[in-house]
Image (tube, rainbow, N blue to C red):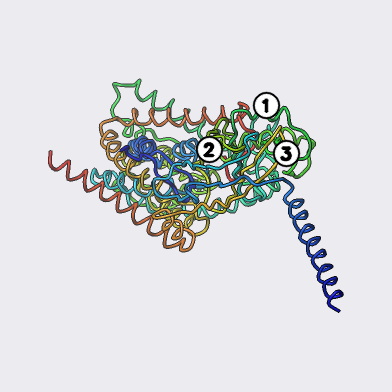
């Protein structure tokens, strides 16, 4: 008697190979644990590739990120890498920005060019963030004789640094070791929330560079805090999608999260062993690979010139 | 008096005979074809989608005239389909552009053919030709709006999309014959059902074909239902969406916490 490796997904309306989905969850969970990104920008296209409808892929992925980021947040919390104060402010800003972003998308749709603008924004954002991080972390790696990058950047009084010090409502974030205006994480949270809503992603891959370069948080605290913020964003999305669109496939999410929670634990341990610049250059490479893949999708003639409404 | 009564009875009998004949002729005409295939059975008679469903196979058996061939078709309900047409934005980037409505589209179209179908197709002509069963024949049934003058290409892309999902398919050489007796032969068909078929009512048509012309048709209902855990989960998701969402979140949180504790314990053990 053979082992039934296929499971039927009642919401997706298709059957999937359990090992394949478990493996995908494991790989994306590993990246999530290492870099503090939710992995939605990787997982959703992979799920669509194995035959899951796009709307179900995106919503079920949010559900699995809840599990993966719980596990990842816990692992990072034990390591002292979660700045709850900063994460909460970013989260509040993100929720507000998300609401604004949904309205922006409505306006863009009514103008008729929403899909084009979304995809171009996606490629430009990925290209800009990836290139900047890659170049910056490469320079850091090449300057081996210098001490840890975070201390080095703190010692340079830039215009941006002076501006940060002039803003009102300054408070000290102990875990991150930075003094900032309370408005900074709130405003940046709104900015990331708007972009995330427009692009239909959790926003982890935008939030991480924002925390590193604009909030000047140490890389290891960035990863844990990003996961903490993603956890709450995805709880919100999972419940809303289940209630309004019925697109969360729990079976799919469960298999994915079994793989991803395992992967996230290994990822968190691996992240501790890597240096900040190594982490950044790896994430930058990943972001650039996704950007190049999206650019090819835009430039090469598709196999089928029709798609279901709601697809990418 | 008695003679008159017998004459009236005889007139009634004649009228009755003519009526019966007319009804029979009418029935034959409305059926369009001469005779239905005999003793057709499908095993199983319904498709149950359980937790381990990954597509399935049905077995069809029956008897048809020895000089004929059998063709089986499974179709779903007709409906409208909204699709996005991909095109080049700014003459460079491929994007989803216009929304097209494909009307009168069968949700599923599966054709099971004997080995000799190509010969049948070459010999076919007229309104009862087997050509009207092919996937290409759907172009006459499906309307695409808004009109663009490019309907042939759009229909070809539509077929590609449906075939990629396995919901439109032509299975060649899936009907086999045996035991020819008294001008009748038995057939057996292996009907592959795709994993993406949705719960609902489907129709299985068995056609008898002679010299490329359809001579008879028999239709059977083929229900597809969710069963067991998928049925329970689907009912919860669609009828109690908020509860389903909260439960899905709680289970994910619990799984994440469990893995966190498990790894924490494993670390402590070292």
State the separation of the CA atoms marked 2 and 1: 19 Å
Looking at the rendered structure, the secondary structure element under dot 1 is helix
Residue highlighted by disc 3: B139
Q: In terms of image quadrants, where is residue B71?
A: top right
Residue highlighted by disc 1: B119
* Residue A42 image offset from top left, x and y in percent: 45, 36
* Residue A187 image offset from top left, x and y in percent: 48, 50
Looking at the rendered structure, the secondary structure element under dot 2 is strand
State the separation of the CA atoms marked 3 and 2: 27 Å
Q: Nearer the viewer, residue B262 or A116?
A: B262
The answer to the question of whether label 3 and label 2 lie on touching residues, with beta carbons closer than 8 A, is no
Q: Point out which mark residue B165 bears.
A: none
State the separation of the CA atoms marked 1 and 3: 22 Å
* Disc 1 crowd, CA 10 A, few/some/many (<14, 14-19, 20+): few
Q: Chain of mark 1?
A: B
Residue highlighted by disc 2: B189
């Amino acid at each position: 008697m053979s082992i039934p490796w296929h499971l039927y997904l009642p919401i997706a309306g298709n059957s999937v190979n359990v090992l394949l989905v478990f493996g995908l969850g494991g790989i994306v969970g590993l990246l999530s644990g290492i870099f503090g990104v939710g992995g939605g920008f990787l997982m959703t296209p992979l799920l669509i590739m194995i035959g899951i409808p796009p709307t179900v892929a995106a919503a079920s992925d949010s559900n699995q990120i809840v599990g993966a980021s719980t596990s990842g947040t816990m692992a990072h919390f034990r390591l002292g890498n979660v700045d709850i104060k900063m994460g909460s402010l970013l989260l509040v800003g993100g929720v507000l920005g998300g609401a604004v972003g949904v309205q922006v998308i409505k306006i863009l749709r009514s103008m008729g060019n929403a899909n084009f603008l979304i995809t171009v924004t996606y490629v430009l954002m990925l290209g800009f963030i990836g290139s900047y991080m890659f170049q910056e972390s490469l320079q850091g790696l090449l300057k081996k004789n210098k001490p840890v990058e975070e201390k080095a950047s703190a010692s340079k009084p830039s215009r941006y640094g002076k501006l940060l010090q002039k803003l009102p409502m300054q408070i000290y974030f102990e875990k991150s070791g930075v003094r900032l205006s309370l408005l900074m994480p709130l405003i940046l949270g709104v900015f990331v929330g708007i972009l995330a809503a427009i692009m239909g992603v959790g926003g982890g891959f935008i939030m991480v560079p924002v925390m590193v370069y604009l909030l000047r948080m140490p890389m290891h605290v960035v990863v844990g805090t990003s996961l903490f913020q993603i956890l709450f964003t995805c709880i919100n999305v999972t419940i809303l999608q289940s209630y309004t669109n019925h697109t969360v496939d729990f079976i799919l999410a469960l298999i994915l999260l079994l793989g991803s929670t395992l992967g996230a634990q290994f990822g968190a341990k691996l992240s501790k062993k890597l240096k900040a610049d190594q982490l950044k250059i790896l994430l930058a490479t990943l972001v650039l690979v996704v950007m190049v893949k999206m650019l090819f999708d835009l430039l090469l003639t598709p196999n089928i010139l029709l798609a279901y409404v709601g697809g990418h | 008096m008695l003679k008159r009564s017998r004459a009236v009875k005889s007139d009634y009998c004649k009228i009755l005979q003519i009526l019966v004949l007319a009804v029979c002729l009418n029935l034959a005409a409305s059926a369009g074809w001469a005779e239905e295939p005999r003793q057709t059975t499908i095993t199983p008679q319904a498709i149950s989608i359980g937790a381990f469903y990954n597509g399935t196979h049905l077995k069809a058996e029956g008897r048809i005239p020895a000089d004929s061939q059998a063709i089986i078709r499974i179709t779903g309900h007709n409906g409208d389909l909204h699709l996005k047409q991909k095109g080049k934005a700014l003459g460079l980037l491929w994007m989803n552009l216009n929304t097209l409505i494909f009307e009168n589209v069968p949700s599923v179209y599966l054709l099971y053919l004997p080995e000799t179908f190509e010969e049948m197709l070459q010999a076919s002509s007229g309104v009862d030709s087997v050509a009207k069963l092919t996937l290409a024949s759907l172009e006459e049934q499906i309307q695409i709006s808004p009109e663009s003058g490019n309907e042939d290409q759009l229909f070809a892309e539509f077929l590609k999309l449906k075939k990629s999902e396995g919901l439109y398919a032509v299975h060649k050489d899936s009907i086999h014959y045996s035991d020819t007796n008294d001008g009748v032969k038995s057939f057996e068909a292996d009907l592959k059902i795709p994993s993406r078929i949705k719960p609902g009512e489907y129709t299985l048509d068995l056609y008898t074909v002679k010299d490329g012309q359809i001579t008879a048709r028999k239709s059977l209902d083929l229900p597809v239902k969710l069963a067991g855990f998928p049925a329970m989960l689907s009912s919860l998701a669609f009828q109690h969406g908020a509860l389903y969402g909260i439960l899905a979140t709680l289970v994910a949180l619990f799984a994440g916490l469990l893995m966190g504790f498990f790894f924490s314990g494993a670390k402590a053990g070292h």
